[in-house]
Image (cartoon, grey):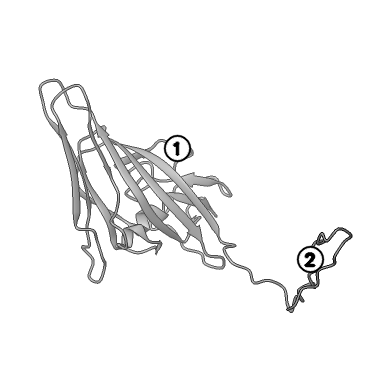
Amino acid sequence: MMRKRNMKKGGRQSAPQVSPVAITHPPSLGNFEIVHSTRLRFVTNAAQLEQPITYQNLLDLILFLTSATAPYDVFTSVKVRAVELWAAPLLGSAVTTTVRFVGETAGSIGSLKTVTDTSMGVQPAHVKARPGANTLASMFQVSSGAVAFDLTCPTGTVVDVELSYKNLPGIAVAAQNVSVGATVGILAYRGLDGLGAATSKFTTAVLPQV
């Protein structure tokens, strides 16, 4: 398109005159899903040995209570950004924490990466592990029994998980385990192993718990 320039006195050019662009239709829409990134904290009340944490467990962490016994996942997909553990040793003893990103389910792509730390002093054993690029844990996954990662750690370990959630409208997924006497209509939190507050081996630091 040719632009016409007007010459002012003295040879100076005025601003170019541009013809308006015709809008043929409204712009497309995208990214209207609810996306939430968070860090959730838990404390183990029992020792863990290669405890598997599934995508179903991770999606069951944040629940909407539709009845006293029927919680539903708030989000429909999840990806793991990081897992961090702290475990304090008893005087004169050693303590070890381990995170493994595995591909134990057929067809899943795991990092096959193990991150571990051992402490014998006053400093806690500390691990911060991230899934490898282009592995399942690093990408959004729907609720399933596939293992995202597993944990080995003693009682009293602080476990933080950094997660990103996404909600696809029109899909409702019930939690794997029912709740007992829950308050209808609220959001509540569950242990990292997907079990209710009374039986979970991971006590959540966020209230309310179901």
Q: Position of residue 173 (x, y in %)?
A: 47, 63
Q: Nearer the viewer, residue 70 or 164?
A: 164
Residue at the extreme front = 10
**In the rendered view of the protein, which quadrant contains the N terminus?**
bottom right
Circle 2 packing at 10 Å, graded few (<14), some (14-19), many (20+), is few
Q: Nearer the viewer, residue 178 or 42?
A: 42
Query: Judging from the image, what secondary structure is the residue with disc 1 in?
Result: loop
Q: Position of residue 98 (x, y in %)?
A: 19, 43
Q: What residue sits 18% from the left and 50% below the top? A: 114
The reply to whether residue 49 is in sight is: no
The reply to whether residue 47 is in sight is: yes
Q: What residue sits 31% from the left and 45% below the top? A: 83
Amino acid type of the residue tagged 2 in the rendering: Pro
- Occupied quadrant, residue 77: bottom left
Mark 2 or 1: in front is 2
Query: Sequence-wise, which precedes: disc 2 or disc 1?
Result: 2
**In the rendered view of the protein, which quadrant contains the C terminus?**
top left
Circle 1 packing at 10 Å, graded few (<14), some (14-19), many (20+), is few
Please give the label number shown on residue 67: none
Residue at which label 1 appears: 206
Q: Position of residue 44 (x, y in %)?
A: 28, 37
Q: Going by the image, does 117 lie left or right of 10? A: left
Q: Position of residue 153 (x, y in %)?
A: 20, 39
Q: Going by the image, does 120 lie left or right of 6? A: left
Amino acid type of the residue tagged 1 in the rendering: Val
Distance between the alpha carbons at the discs numbered 2 and 1: 60 Å
Q: Nearer the viewer, residue 200 or 113?
A: 113
Residue at which label 2 appears: 16
Query: Judging from the image, what secondary structure is the residue with disc 2 in?
Result: loop
